[in-house]
Image: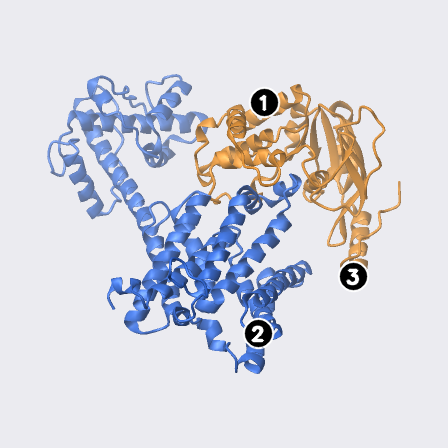
Chain colours: A blue, B orange
């Protein structure tokens, strides 16, 4: 099927239901993940099943209200029973949750098998949902002459309720999620907010259940929220990113399910996992790859500076007034490929004259080298004066730290040490580079 | 227990009356009876597990005492903003939470705003002012996970300042901070005292107690001594606080816990009056 085929008459209702269900779960799920309660979301989404079935049995039809009330009661029961077991101190939180929701879920499956299988519900529908059915089961009303799927209407209403509650209680959710004791001391009761979130989770779960099944509900409660925390450092950003991830997973899941002729909710959950993997690797700030690249950039800068340090000391030895032999440069422990890359960058950046083993320094390279050696020797004085470290042990620590001190810090260091002229080995402290060239290249090393 | 109405026209900042607090039926604070005068810097000192944090939490109304009561400026504790600024221990929150420094400081204004109302321009101005006071206004937009330990502590202090309370309760604000932060916090404490606020600080470093505080409260499961530094922070009292295990008290607490194991809802009676 072509991608645009998703928007034709037969597929559009399914797409709408899938997207709405995913967004719904992702919305409350973002809060569950941030409150480190994602597992409780799982527990509730399973624990509601017997309530759902009992509601259905009492009403005798698939009206939403009785099923909803039953599910809410079961959700609250799950949350409270878990809490009670946890507080008994004999059972830890995860185990308590596991005991409660697996029992309730199994009970729900048995109830369906025994009393409701002939009618409309069946256990596999609980796991996988029946999103294809949504296309047939239309709402009795119409919007601009178009009859949306019944479950889409339900999901839209629930989404509006969740959005409304979160918008109204934005700061209450924020504070109770971040610092519940402070909220309590301010009279914004955290237990109340906790129960409210549990209620919203139950409501969302029930509304999504019928269409997409429990596998997808569990996935969508956790995965988009986790993606959101990888992508943003603000609460609103996390929520929006989670919504984006949910939509992406729904669209791609539906498309690939139709292409492969397999379960829609299964493919949506797999897609969510795929989106998570991509975010995990590529997320600009917290992703694996940017992290590696930042490490690489740091290593490269250190190697560059070490090369400049060696060249500057060589220059000092041949041209300098110093009567004491300069210290040796950094130990050559850097991998060869990094050294080649660093030398290339030095050449391209105009710090050295040529791309040879021991090139001459340009004025720019001279300034960088001088700064480095200056930092190195000042730090040696600091270690020797203030930390009483013997002269033979100064060199290596200074080699490590010299790459991380910026110019401002170095100036303060020099002042604190009363502007010394020689380091503990008797070597001259190079004066800070001044003049035009220094001003042109006024970029302190990054931390 | 609801405390009786105060008849004193000029009540002390904090009154703690016969307070006993238990966790899982085991008493961790026994019969604390103390009055803290207004406008003082008060250090709470005692060994690990002495119940210092629990005392603060009881003063905030965060734990339900097994017996006894607390009054703040003559008013009984009730749910709601009763005017205590709170600085919890730094590790008590998740510093990876996706909020900015300003967001956290704004939380101090939530009590006055009450339910539903959002912080507006006035609250933001106040938050910036508080950040200035603790010297980190330039970090306002920073995400909190990027802060150093000292900066985190200053954020908490700024948040408490935004509460604009008469009484401040701080749980180890000096723990694990750099020297500059320690000085900055100390200065803020002095400003608070100068404006007539009462500040109660759980403190670990015995070396600095005399320098930092006017009053001291020596705590080890029970109140060992309380009063002005000069008369209270004595060698004898310190020995009573830190030296020697309270074997009998421990045994009694254990007995209460064992006895209560039969019924989790049961709360131990207060120990008889001294």
Left or right placement of residue B176 versus residue A147 in this view: right
Q: Chain of mark 3?
A: B
Which mark, residue B157?
A: none
Front residue of A100/A404: it is A100
Please name the residue that numbered disc 1 is placed on: B187
Residue A374 in view in this figure? yes
Q: Specify the quadrant that holds the C terminus of chain B.
A: top right
Please name the residue that numbered disc 2 is placed on: A108
Q: Chain of mark 2?
A: A
Q: Residue B1 in the image: x percent, y percent?
A: 81, 44
Cα–Cα span, label 3 and label 1: 49 Å
Q: How many marks?
A: 3
Residue drawn at x 58%, y 30% is B162
Q: Residue A425 in the image: x percent, y percent?
A: 33, 26
Pointer 3 and pointer 1 on the same chain: yes
**Residue A109 vertical position relative to residue A325 in the rendered view, above or below:** below
Q: Residue B52 in the image: x percent, y percent?
A: 70, 39
Q: Give the SS element for disc 2.
A: helix
**Residue B96 vertical position relative to residue A432 in the rendered view, above or below:** below
- Name the outermost residue toward the front: A145
Q: Give the SS element for disc 3.
A: loop
Q: Mark 2: give few (<14), some (14-19) or many (20+) Cα within 10 Å.
A: many
């Amino acid at each position: 099927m072509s991608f645009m085929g998703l928007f034709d008459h037969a597929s559009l209702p399914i797409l709408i239901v899938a997207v709405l269900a995913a967004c719904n779960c992702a919305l409350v799920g973002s809060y569950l993940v941030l409150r480190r309660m994602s597992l409780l979301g799982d527990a509730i989404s399973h624990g509601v099943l017997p309530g759902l079935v009992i509601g259905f049995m009492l009403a005798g039809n698939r009206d939403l209200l009785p099923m909803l009330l039953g599910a809410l009661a079961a959700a609250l029961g799950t949350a409270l029973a878990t809490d009670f077991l946890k507080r008994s101190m004999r059972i830890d939180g995860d185990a308590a949750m596991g005991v409660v929701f697996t029992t309730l879920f199994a009970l729900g499956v048995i109830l369906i098998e025994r009393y409701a299988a002939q009618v409309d519900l069946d256990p596999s529908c609980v796991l996988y949902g029946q999103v294809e059915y949504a296309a047939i089961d239309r709402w009795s009303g119409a919007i601009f002459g178009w009859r949306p799927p019944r479950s889409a209407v339900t999901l839209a209403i629930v989404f509006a309720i969740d959005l409304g509650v979160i918008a109204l209680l934005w700061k209450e959710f924020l504070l109770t999620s971040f610092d519940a004791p402070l909220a309590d001391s301010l009279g914004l009761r955290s237990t109340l907010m906790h129960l409210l979130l549990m209620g919203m989770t139950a409501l969302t779960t029930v509304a999504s259940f019928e269409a997409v099944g429990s596998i997808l509900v569990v996935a969508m409660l956790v995965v988009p929220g986790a993606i959101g925390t990888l992508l943003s450092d603000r609460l609103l950003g996390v929520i929006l990113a989670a919504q984006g991830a949910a939509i992406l997973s729904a669209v791609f899941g539906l498309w690939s399910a139709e292409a492969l002729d397999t379960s829609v909710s299964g493919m949506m959950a797999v897609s969510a996992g795929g989106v998570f993997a991509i975010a995990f690797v590529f997320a600009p700030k917290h992703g694996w790859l940017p992290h590696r690249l930042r490490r690489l950039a740091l290593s490269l800068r250190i190697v560059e500076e070490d090369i400049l340090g060696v060249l500057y000391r060589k220059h000092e030895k041949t041209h300098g007034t110093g009567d004491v032999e300069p210290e040796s440069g950094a130990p050559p422990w850097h991998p060869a490929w990094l050294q080649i890359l660093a030398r290339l960058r030095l050449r391209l950046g105009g710090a050295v004259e040529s791309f040879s083993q021991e090139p001459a320094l340009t004025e720019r390279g001279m300034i960088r080298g001088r700064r480095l050696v200056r930092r190195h020797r000042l730090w040696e004085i600091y270690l020797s004066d203030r930390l009483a470290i013997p002269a033979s042990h100064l060199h290596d620590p200074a080699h490590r730290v010299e790459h991380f001190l910026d110019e401002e810090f170095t100036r303060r260091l020099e002042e604190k040490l009363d502007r010394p002229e020689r380091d503990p080995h008797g070597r001259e402290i190079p004066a800070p580079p001044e003049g035009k060239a220094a001003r042109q290249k006024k970029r302190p090393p990054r931390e | 227990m609801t405390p009786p109405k105060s008849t004193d026209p000029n009540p002390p900042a904090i009154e703690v009356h016969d307070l006993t607090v238990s966790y899982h039926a085991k008493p961790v604070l026994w019969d604390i009876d103390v009055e803290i005068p207004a406008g003082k810097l008060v250090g709470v000192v005692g060994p690990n597990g002495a119940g210092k944090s629990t005392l603060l939490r009881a003063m905030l109304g965060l734990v339900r005492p097994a017996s006894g009561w607390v009054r703040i400026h003559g008013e009984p504790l009730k749910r709601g903003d009763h005017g205590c600024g709170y600085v919890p221990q730094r590790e008590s929150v998740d510093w990876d939470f996706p909020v900015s420094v300003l967001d956290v400081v704004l939380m101090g204004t939530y009590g006055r705003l009450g339910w539903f109302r959002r912080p507006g321009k006035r609250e933001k101005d106040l938050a910036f002012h508080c950040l200035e006071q603790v010297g980190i206004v330039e970090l306002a937009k920073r995400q909190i996970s990027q802060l150093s330990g000292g900066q985190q502590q200053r954020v908490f202090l700024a948040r408490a300042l935004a509460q604009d309370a008469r009484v401040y309760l701080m749980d180890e604000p000096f723990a694990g901070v750099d020297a500059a932060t320690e000085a900055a916090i100390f200065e803020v404490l002095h400003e608070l005292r100068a404006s007539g606020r009462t500040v109660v600080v759980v403190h670990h470093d015995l070396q600095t107690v005399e320098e930092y505080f006017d009053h001291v409260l020596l705590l080890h499961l029970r109140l060992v001594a309380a009063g002005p530094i000069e008369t209270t922070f004595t060698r004898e009292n310190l020995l009573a606080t830190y030296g020697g295990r309270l074997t009998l008290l421990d045994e009694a607490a254990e007995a209460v816990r064992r006895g209560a194991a039969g019924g989790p809802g049961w709360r131990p009676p207060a120990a008889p009056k001294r």
